Amino acid sequence: MIVNLVEYLTVAMIIFIIGVLGIFLNRKNIIIMLMSLELILLAINFNFIIFSVSLNDLMGQVYSLFILTVAAAESAIGLAILVAYYRIRGTIAVKYINLMRG
């Protein structure tokens, strides 16, 4: 059973659109916004891997490893900031984030 390039790219496009809609439709919960950002990065990684395999080039897979590293660091730092903000304010509502200036 052979699956062509267009079907893989369609799956990646659907994941990307779900991530973008998650950011635009949910502006109140910052944890869901971070998860939507991770979905966007996952779709980009999927595209890199798809084209890397189809072109027989390893650079797309190397780039996807770098993106995964950056995504893991972004998640860890983002959640650490959220925990610190929750301890100070008692809420993680996005509308109060502008009070974080210091």
Image: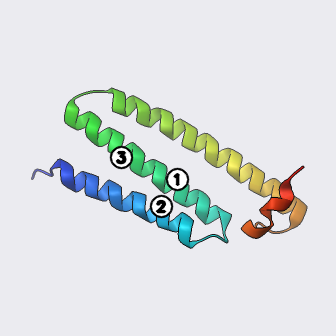
User: What colouring method underlies this structural image?
Assistant: rainbow
Q: Are marks 1 and 3 in contact (CB under 8 Å)?
A: no
The label shown at residue 46 is 3
Along the polypeptide, which appears first: circle 2 or circle 3? 2
The label shown at residue 27 is none
For marks 2 and 3, give the CA distance. 14 Å
Using the image, determine if residue 36 lies above or below residue 4.
below
Residue 51 image point, x, y percent: 27, 38
Residue 82 image point, x, y percent: 75, 56
Residue identifier under label 1: 38
Residue 26 visible at all: yes
Q: Amino acid at mark 2?
A: Gly
- Which residue is at a point 81% across and 60% down the rendered structure image? 98
For marks 1 and 3, give the CA distance. 12 Å
Along the polypeptide, which appears first: circle 1 or circle 2? 2
Q: Secondary structure at mark 2?
A: helix
- Which residue is at a point 64% across and 62% down the rendered structure image? 31
Along the polypeptide, which appears first: circle 1 or circle 3? 1
Snapshot quadrant of residue 52: top left
For marks 1 and 2, give the CA distance. 8 Å
The label shown at residue 19 is 2
- Which residue is at a point 9% across and 53% down the rendered structure image? 1
Q: Are marks 1 and 2 in contact (CB under 8 Å)?
A: yes
- Which residue is at a point 67% across and 72% down the rendered structure image? 28
Q: Secondary structure at mark 1?
A: helix
Residue 58 image point, x, y percent: 31, 27
Label 2, residues with CA under 10 Å away: few <14, some 14-19, many ≥20: many
Label 3, residues with CA under 10 Å away: few <14, some 14-19, many ≥20: many
Q: Amino acid at mark 3?
A: Phe
Residue 10 image point, x, y percent: 27, 58
Q: Amino acid at mark 1?
A: Glu
